[in-house]
């Protein structure tokens, strides 16, 4: 089997001359097959969702008939269908782009052009990563603009001007560069200097970086995009404080975020880690829900905390990254990994960056097939958090709050069951409210 040999001085990945092996052809065939199957499955699921939502567009489900108007139900159906159709366009384009970068040789072409321009070495490797992510981000901009200023605007959710959108784009780009470039440089250095166990060192560095980001995000990064002010509603503060005391939960503060400056969607969340935890309410949420309803929503979020869902998700993420980096550590030493994905590794220089990018391009295709497993776990967590909220607050308040949020966010009440089982990280409205013993017009009792 062809393999990459290592320069004993600097542990760079050096390639022996080789022709396309049977392994590379097998990888090409497997990847293209998996990509086409994933595309076909997503097309089938999305088509089911569109047909199912359209079929029940004209009638509000009986359980919701007294609480959801026909116009609101039809708005949710139309919003869902438009998003699904646009999502299919994005899926087709993204699948074609992945093929272009990989088996059609786009990434190899970009790599060689940068070698011609900059020569081989660390600078060229960093430039390849920067160029790839810059090009990918530019290609996503037209879709983001259409999604925000056509779809979201048409349904009344977008509150941003194009100026604000561009400012946010500039901010996120600058932050990505300030954080990403040092991280990229560290990754490439570890790949070069720590030998065959580089992936284990990288995993440790990634964990450290992720935990640090959880600590600094609430106070250093989030305020760059949104304004946060202390909760001023004394009645709500009293209810929330009492709830957190009952649940033995402490936070550094209760804050209101100006979500209404960008979107009409509403939410509440915890942010931070350890002693840096904050409770954040969207101002849109406070405008739409009563004090008891907001408290019930927060009790649901506390349920995630009490059941250790956040820690479990972080542990799952770290475990997945461990497996992924271990796999990448093996693949970087296999010529067929490069040639099978449309790239010709250089025999006289390092190939760290192109190995990382090829891996990032192909792994979503294969991980797509475990989506039903991850979403089922997520739905289980949501049910557990709801059950915890029921023990801490009134089930009618939580049901009423969820119903308002479904309506205000134009979430369809009639998803296709197969699509929901595959893609929904939260249970469909009918299942979730049934567990809360929802009854028509329950909001009138809040």
Image: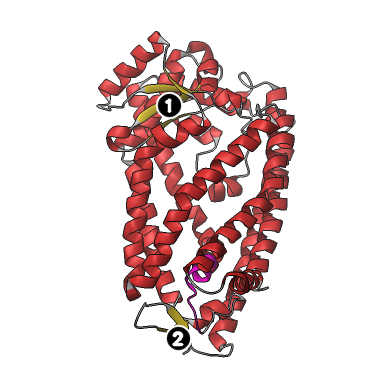
Q: Can residue 395 be seen in this snapshot? A: no
Instruction: Report the residue that reaches farthest toward the front.
Output: 118
User: Can you give x and y, in whole percent of width and height, for residue 239 in the image?
Assistant: 35, 14
Pick the residue in front: 383 or 21. Answer: 21
Tell me where residue 277 sits by quadrant: top left
User: In the image, which disc is placed on residue 3?
Assistant: 2
Secondary structure type for disc 1: strand
Secondary structure type for disc 2: loop
According to the picture, the residue beneath numbered tag 1 turns out to be 280
17 in magenta: no
| 243 to 77, vertically: above or below | above
Q: Can residue 339 be seen in this snapshot? A: yes
Magenta region: which residues?
348-357
User: Can you give x and y, in whole percent of width and height, for residue 337 in the image?
Assistant: 52, 77
User: Can you give x and y, in whole percent of width and height, for residue 117 in the image?
Assistant: 62, 70
Q: Earlier in the sequence, mark 2 or mark 1?
A: 2
Horizontal relation, residue 203 to residue 333: left or right: left
The mark closer to the camera, 2 or 1, is 2
User: Can you give x and y, in whole percent of width and height, for residue 48 in the image?
Assistant: 68, 49
């Amino acid at each position: 089997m062809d393999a990459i040999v290592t320069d004993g001085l600097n542990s760079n990945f050096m390639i022996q001359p080789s022709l396309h092996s049977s392994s590379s052809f097998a990888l090409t065939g497997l990847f293209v097959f998996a990509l086409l199957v994933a595309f076909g499955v997503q097309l089938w699921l999305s088509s089911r969702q569109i047909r199912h939502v359209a079929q029940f567009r004209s009638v509000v489900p009986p359980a919701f008939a007294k609480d959801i108007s026909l116009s609101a139900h039809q708005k949710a159906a139309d919003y869902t269908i438009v998003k699904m159709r646009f999502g299919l366009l994005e899926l087709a384009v993204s699948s074609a782009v992945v093929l272009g970068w990989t088996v059609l040789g786009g990434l190899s072409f970009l790599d060689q052009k940068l070698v011609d321009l900059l020569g081989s070495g660390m600078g060229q490797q960093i430039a390849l990563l920067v160029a790839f992510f810059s090009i990918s981000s530019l290609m996503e901009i037209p879709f983001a603009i259409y999604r925000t200023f056509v779809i979201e605007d048409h349904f009344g959710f977008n509150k941003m001007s194009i100026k604000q959108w561009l400012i946010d784009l500039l901010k996120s780009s600058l932050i990505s560069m300030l954080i990403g470039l040092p991280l990229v440089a560290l990754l490439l250095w570890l790949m070069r200097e720590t030998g065959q166990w580089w992936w284990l060192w990288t995993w440790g560095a990634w964990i450290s970086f992720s935990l640090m980001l959880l600590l600094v995000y609430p106070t250093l990064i989030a305020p760059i995009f949104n304004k946060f002010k202390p909760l001023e509603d004394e009645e709500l503060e009293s209810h929330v404080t009492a709830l957190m005391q009952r649940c033995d939960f402490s936070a550094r503060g209760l804050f209101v975020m100006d979500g209404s400056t960008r979107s009409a969607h509403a939410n509440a969340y915890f942010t931070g880690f350890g002693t840096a935890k904050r409770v954040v309410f969207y101002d849109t949420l406070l405008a739409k829900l009563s004090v008891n309803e907001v408290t019930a929503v927060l009790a649901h979020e506390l349920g995630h905390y009490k059941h250790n869902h956040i820690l479990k998700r972080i542990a799952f993420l770290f475990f997945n990254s461990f497996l992924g980096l271990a796999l990448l550590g093996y693949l970087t030493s296999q010529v067929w990994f490069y040639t099978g994905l449309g790239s010709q590794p250089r025999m006289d220089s390092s190939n760290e960056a192109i190995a990382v990018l090829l891996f990032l391009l192909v792994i979503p295709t294969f991980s797509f097939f475990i989506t039903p497993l991850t979403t089922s776990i997520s739905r289980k967590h949501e049910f557990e958090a709801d059950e915890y909220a029921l023990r801490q607050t009134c089930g009618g308040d939580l049901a009423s709050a969820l119903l308002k949020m479904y309506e205000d966010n134009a979430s369809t009440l009639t998803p296709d069951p197969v699509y929901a089982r595959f893609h929904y990280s939260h249970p469909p409205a009918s299942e979730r409210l049934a567990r809360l013993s929802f009854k028509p017009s329950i909001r009138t009792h809040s």
